Every structure is written in C-alpha cells, then in structure tokens.
C-alpha cells in the first residue's frame, strides 16, 4: 500500500511553513513512515483493541493465541468467529474482560453493517470516519486516528491526545511544558494539509539526542 500524496511535496511544504520542522526534516532525512496492510476494518480494529495498553511483544502473543482459535480461517478470524466463541475461551487467550466485550461489540457492529467496509472507509472524510469508528466500545479517538494514519495513509491527521506527540513537540521546539491539545491544534494549523507527516517527524525527534 502506498500513500495518496507525494511525500517530497509534503516535506517541502512543511519545511517552508515551519523553520523548526525544516531543521528536523533535514536531521531525520526522507519520510519513511510505513503503512500497515489491512484485510478489513474489522481485522484492523480487532488488532487495535488487543494491542491497547500492552507492549507490542505481549499484544502480538495474545493476538496470535486468538488467531490460533480459528486454524481454518486462512484470511483471519471474522465477526462470526468472535460471536460464536464463548467468553472463557477468549479470556483464556489473555484478553481482559473489557477487551472481550470490545471485540464482541466490534463484531456485532460489523456483522450488522454499522461500520464501513475498507473500500467504503477510503471514500469517507476523516471526521466522518472517526465518528463512525468511535461508536465501537474500546475504540476512542486516538485509536481511530491511528487507523487513519497507519492503515489508510491519510495525510492530514494530528492526534492531539497522543502524549508522545505532545512530548515530541516540546522537545523539538525547546518548550519546558507540554502543549495542551487545544494549543497544539492551533500550532499545527500551519502544517496542514500534511499534519500526518509533521506528526511522524515530531515522533522521530524523541529518538534524537
């Protein structure tokens, strides 16, 4: 999967709009954000639910155990699989009670057609899609924005509730305090329509000495 925008054009725009980002882009180098392939909206959100508040290693192990419940599901487990599985079997994979309820709610909503398909998601505006996704139990605005950024490759998402992004902004712009989300939204207006790219570069600042 590739981006629907030109990364070189995006970095040029950001460099012209913000001298601090210009220096950060020069230090970090080319835009190398990687998109994660998705077989479906259900598959992507199910994975997001499992991974919440866990290390990648622990979450991958638990997700693998859930997948192992359905050895014949070559394309990954489906809403029907989850809805037919007793709670105790899902809990035995290492899922918390809250995550079992979230997966079941997701499965019911997808089964009922309440959520868009992956093809339909590509045609929806960011705000509309976020509004649809946050209906799911356990999927908040941050999770929906990560879906837009890393699954769909949307160019103009600024995850204001992301603590690491606020921390990265403070480091890159040499601020003593982390910006409040409302303040970051105002600051980030200058980065539109490539706020996803700006976010990626800011996150990279946390890796710099």
Image (cartoon, grey):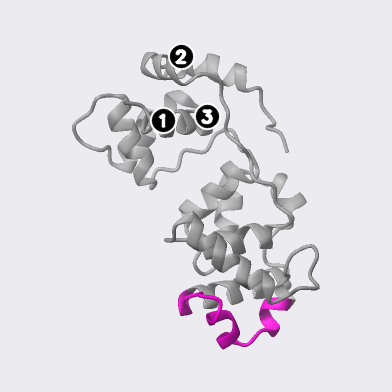
Per the picture, the main secondary structure of the magenta-coloured stretch is helix
For label 3, the residue is: 197
**Residue 89 lies in the magenta-colored region:** yes
Q: Are marks 3 and 2 in contact (CB under 8 Å)?
A: no
User: Measuring 74% from the left and 77% from the top, which residue is drawn there?
Assistant: 80
Tell me: residue 104, above or below residue 53. Answer: below
Quadrant for the N terminus, please: top right
Q: Earlier in the sequence, mark 3 or mark 1?
A: 3
Give the Cα separation between the discs numbered 2 and 1.
12 Å
Give the Cα separation between the discs numbered 3 and 1.
9 Å
User: Measuring 61% from the left and 17% from the top, which residue is drawn there?
Assistant: 8
Q: 81 or 158: nearer the eye?
A: 81
Q: Earlier in the sequence, mark 2 or mark 1?
A: 2
Tell me: residue 160, above or below residue 193. Answer: below
Instruction: State which mark lies toward you, 3 or 2.
Output: 2
The circle on residue 73 is none
Tell me: residue 53, above or below residue 119. Answer: below
For label 2, the residue is: 26
Q: Secondary structure at mark 1?
A: helix
Relative side of 175 to 36, left or right: left
Give how far across and how far down residue 29 sits, in percent: 51, 18
Q: Secondary structure at mark 2?
A: helix
Magenta range: 81-98
For label 1, the residue is: 202
Give how far across and how far down residue 173 sits, in percent: 29, 24
Category of crowding for the residue at label 2, using alpha-carbon neighbours closer than 10 angstroms: few (below 14), some (14–19), many (at least 20): few
Give the Cα separation between the discs numbered 3 and 2.
14 Å
User: Measuring 18% from the left and 32% from the top, which residue is drawn there?
Assistant: 176
């Amino acid at each position: 999967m590739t981006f629907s925008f030109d990364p070189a054009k995006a970095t040029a725009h950001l460099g012209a709009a913000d001298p601090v980002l210009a220096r950060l882009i020069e230090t970090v180098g080319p835009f190398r954000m990687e998109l994660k392939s998705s077989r479906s909206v259900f598959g992507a959100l199910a994975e997001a639910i499992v991974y919440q508040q866990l290390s990648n290693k622990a979450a991958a192990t638990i997700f693998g155990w859930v997948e192992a419940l359905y050895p014949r599901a070559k394309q990954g487990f489906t809403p029907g699989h989850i809805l037919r599985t007793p709670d105790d079997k899902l809990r035995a994979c290492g899922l918390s009670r809250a995550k079992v309820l979230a997966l079941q709610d997701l499965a019911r909503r997808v089964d009922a057609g309440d959520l868009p398909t992956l093809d339909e998601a590509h045609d929806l505006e960011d705000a509309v899609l976020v509004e649809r996704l946050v209906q799911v139990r356990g999927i908040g605005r941050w999770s929906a924005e990560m879906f837009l950024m890393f699954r769909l490759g949307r160019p103009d998402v600024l995850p204001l509730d992301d603590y690491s992004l606020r921390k990265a902004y403070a480091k890159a712009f040499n601020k003593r305090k982390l910006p409040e989300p409302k303040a970051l939204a105002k600051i980030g207006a200058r980065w539109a329509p490539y706020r996803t790219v700006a976010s990626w570069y800011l996150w990279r600042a946390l890796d710099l000495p």
